[in-house]
Amino acid sequence: MRMKQLFSSLVVGVSAVVALSSAHAADMTGAGSSFMYPIAAKWADMYKSATGNGLNYQSVGSGAGIKQIKAKTVDFGASDKPLSAAELDAEGLMQFPAIMGGVVAVVNLEGVKPGQLKMTGAVIGDIYLGKITKWNDAAIAALNPGVKLPSEEITVVHRADGSGTTFLFTDFLSKTNAEFKTKIGADAAVKWAVGVGGKGNEGVAANVQRIKGSIGYVEWAYAKKNKMAHTQLKNKDGNFLQPDDEFFKAAAANADWAKTPGFAVVLTDQPGKSAWPITGATFVLMHKAQADAAKGKEVVKFFDWSFKNGAAAATALDYVPMPPSVVKLIEDAWKANLKDATGKAIY
């Protein structure tokens, strides 16, 4: 089964620092998005085998990744919430999309099978607002005729750290639930109305698996890897969908990467009958002025190699690889923005 190939280092509940290869002085360092971690680890393993060069990536969440790249303690950061052009300029950073994928709602509900439960952004928003507190609430029951829903209390699980996955999830809820938008809003870190927190996609997955009657949100690879019960979601066109990389691709089909400053495309709640409603990209952040040009070149070589050799591995983990046309735009951005100490392009 292809998800069983998801390297043994992906351990639910552990979201601290995970070395993707045996660390040595020449290894690249990166930090941030846990959404990206499964494919980052796979690519790192493949790249190490092909080139002998390693990557040490910390799956610490997008917020921490942004802080670390700003502080220049890593060679690149990774965030599922794109930075604005103004923030990039202020910090001397550039960003580019590395991978796309989907976020899913997951539940721990006795008798409910993966993909059986139907949910909408409006209903999930009310659950996360603390307005819907029991699984047999009329609003959930109306979406799920014939499904035996228990009368037990709902335990809400959310991220405890600054998280791009949270940004994508709350952005979707803000677009589909007006009260959620007003009271909670869309951001990488929000003031939650109810619930318990988990660190990283790993921590949320662990809490949902542990707590009966819970609901949470994770990147799709984590849900599949851990055999979690995901829900169907209603998209902008009114269709209930099961998560699938073809539906993630459909959501990305309208993305205008070329005309969006800093590639800062948000893919939630996209139109289209097959568009998965919580789709997003992970953005890699690098300093335009590379103090260590050799390290900067190696980071670019790693992603360039991964774009050209890692698409099948990404698809196997249910991510969406960046299309060749977008990779060309990224290469042009590397040439234009990434310079060594003398001002010479490193790519």
Image (cartoon, helix red, strand yellow):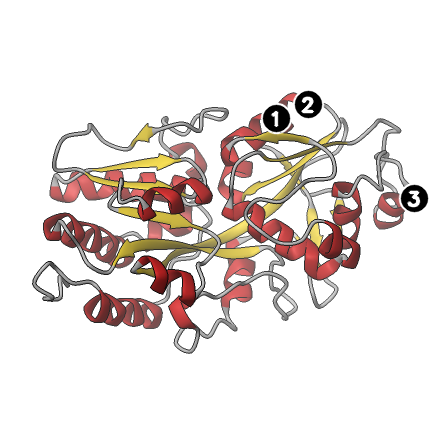
Furthest residue toward bottom? 259
Q: Amino acid at mark 2?
A: Ile
Residue depicted at 86% across the width and 29% down the height: 150
Q: Quadrant of the C terminus?
A: bottom left
Residue wearing tag 1: 207
Other-residue count near label 1 (Cα within 10 Å), few / some / many at <14 / 14–19 / ≥20: many
Furthest residue toward front? 90
Residue wearing tag 3: 138
Residue wearing tag 2: 211
Residue depicted at 33% across the width and 38% down the height: 41
- Above or below residue 217? Residue 248 is below
Q: Is residue 96 visible?
A: no
- The circle drawn on residue 306 is none
- 333 left or right, relative to 226: left
Task: Give SS at disc 2.
Answer: loop
Q: CA distance from mark 3 to mark 1?
A: 26 Å
Residue depicted at 51% across the width and 41% down the height: 162
From the image, state whether disc 3 or disc 1 is nearer to you: 1
Do the residues under discs 3 and 1 have CB atoms within 8 angstroms?
no
Q: Amino acid at mark 3?
A: Ala
Residue depicted at 17% across the width and 52% down the height: 296
Task: Give SS at disc 1.
Answer: helix
Q: Quadrant of residue 60?
A: top left
Q: Quadrant of residue 38?
A: top left
Other-residue count near label 3 (Cα within 10 Å), few / some / many at <14 / 14–19 / ≥20: few
